[in-house]
Image (tube, rainbow, N blue to C red):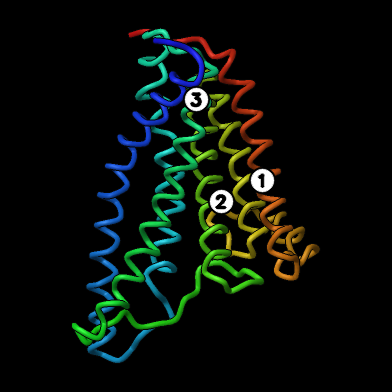
Amino acid sequence: MSDGFSAVKSITSDLFKIQMKWTLSFFSVVLVVFLLLDASWFFTRQAPDVTLAAFIFEPSKIYMLVIGIVPWFAYFTYFISHGVTRKDYFAGTAISAALLAVGLMGLTFAVSGLIHMIEPITGYAPIGTEQSLALISSHPAAQLTGTMIVLFLYYLAGWIVAIGFYRFHISGGFASIAIVIILLSITDAIWAQGNVIVIDWFRHIQPLIDTAALPFTVLVGLSLILAGAALTALWLSTRRTPVKMG
């Protein structure tokens, strides 16, 4: 396979198409569950304050964590054995992960908008008000940006776990899990969320910094620094990872 931009473009396209198919299946299941639950809440008038974007966000974090693990075991050996360089594979994986986060949340917000657009025709709209991340700005663009960054970080977390087990076996795998717990705790703290994975000592550290009072641009900056550190660690591991054949 040719090197350079064309190789990265090809890998990005292949990985994105494969993972987006999985993502559409995931989204469809969550959407059906949401609509069924929402219809139940509508008829019983016992509605929680939740919308599709808020409902799908937490499952999406876990989904991105899991899907970040799968491609490494499924495709790393395949691509490298077919002449793809580690650098190109790394770049393609990272870009496809970012596009996947954009696609998932873009689809969520688009479907949410569509549901509200057809309300005059159907007489039905999901109950609740928008609540996704505890952002300073309530502007939809800010909320969309924040959710995409968080999902991208969760994908990177899954990637760290995958490469930990693939390259360093059981001991390295458990070490990577510890690193991921810290990474995700910091991620959730930055965006003032309840942690999906919480470590006890972090409960005492988190209140020392009131991230909810920080400007949105600072939150994005901190998240990008965190993502940059994760990507750097992933690249340092990827470029030295031997290919396991068979």
Contact, mark 2 vs mark 1 (Cβ under 8 Å): yes
The residue wearing badge 3 is 165
The residue wearing badge 2 is 149
Q: Tell me the quarter of the picture where residue 246 sits.
A: top left
Per the model, the C-alpha gap separating discs 2 and 3 is 25 Å
Q: Secondary structure at mark 3?
A: helix
Task: Point out residue 177 in the picture as x, y percentages from the top left corner.
Answer: 56, 37
Amino acid carrying label 2: it is: Ile
- Seen as rendered, the residue at the extreme bottom is 45
Q: Earlier in the sequence, mark 2 or mark 3?
A: 2
Per the model, the C-alpha gap separating discs 1 and 3 is 25 Å
Task: Point out residue 198 in the picture as x, y percentages from the top left corner.
Answer: 60, 55
Examine the rendered structure and indicate whether residue 104 appears above or below residue 3: below
The residue wearing badge 1 is 224
Amino acid carrying label 3: it is: Phe
Q: For this view, does 240 lie left or right of residue 101?
A: right
Q: For this view, does 148 lie left or right of residue 217?
A: left
Q: Earlier in the sequence, mark 1 or mark 3?
A: 3
User: Local crowd at mark 1 within 10 Å, few (<14), some, or many (≥20)?
Assistant: some
Q: Nearer the viewer, mark 1 or mark 3?
A: 1
Residue drawn at x 47%, y 76% as measured from the top left: 130
